[in-house]
Image (cartoon, rainbow, N blue to C red):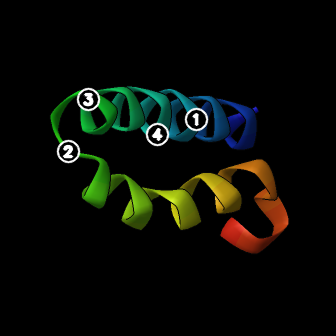
Amino acid sequence: MEFLIGGAICFFMGFVLGTLVDRSQTDTNQSFSHVRNKIDDPMEFY
């Protein structure tokens, strides 16, 4: 259960950060792309 909650929080935070970065500057968005890839593949993240 903790794993699911942690995954949901990570996914939500990544989504919020990605949205804010998309609005501010696209250069920093590239640095968040690898974080999103890890979120999509939980086994790599953990």
In the image, which disc is placed on residue 14? 4
- Please say if the residues under marks 2 and 3 sit with CB atoms less than 8 Å apart: no
Where 32 sits versus 21, above or below? below
Q: Amino acid at mark 2?
A: Gln
| Number of dots carrying numbers | 4
Q: Residue at x 76, y 32 (%)?
A: 1
Whole-percent x, y for residue 41 in the image: 81, 58
The residue that mark 1 highlights is 11
Identity of the residue drawn at 50% across and 27% down: 12
Please report the residue visible at 53 percent of the width from the left and 58 percent of the height from the top. 33
Going from the N terminus, do you reach mark 2 or mark 1 first? 1
Q: Which residue is mark 3?
A: 20
Query: Would you place residue 40 above or below residue 10 in this image?
Result: below
Label 1 packing within 10 angstroms: few (<14), some (14-19), many (20+): some
**Which marked residue is nearer to the observer: mark 1 or mark 3?**
3
Q: Secondary structure at mark 1?
A: helix
Q: Is residue 24 left or right of residue 35?
A: left
**Which structural element holds mark 4?**
helix
Q: Is residue 44 visible?
A: yes
Q: Amino acid at mark 3?
A: Leu
- What kind of element bears circle 2? loop
Q: Position of residue 8 (x, y in %)?
A: 62, 29
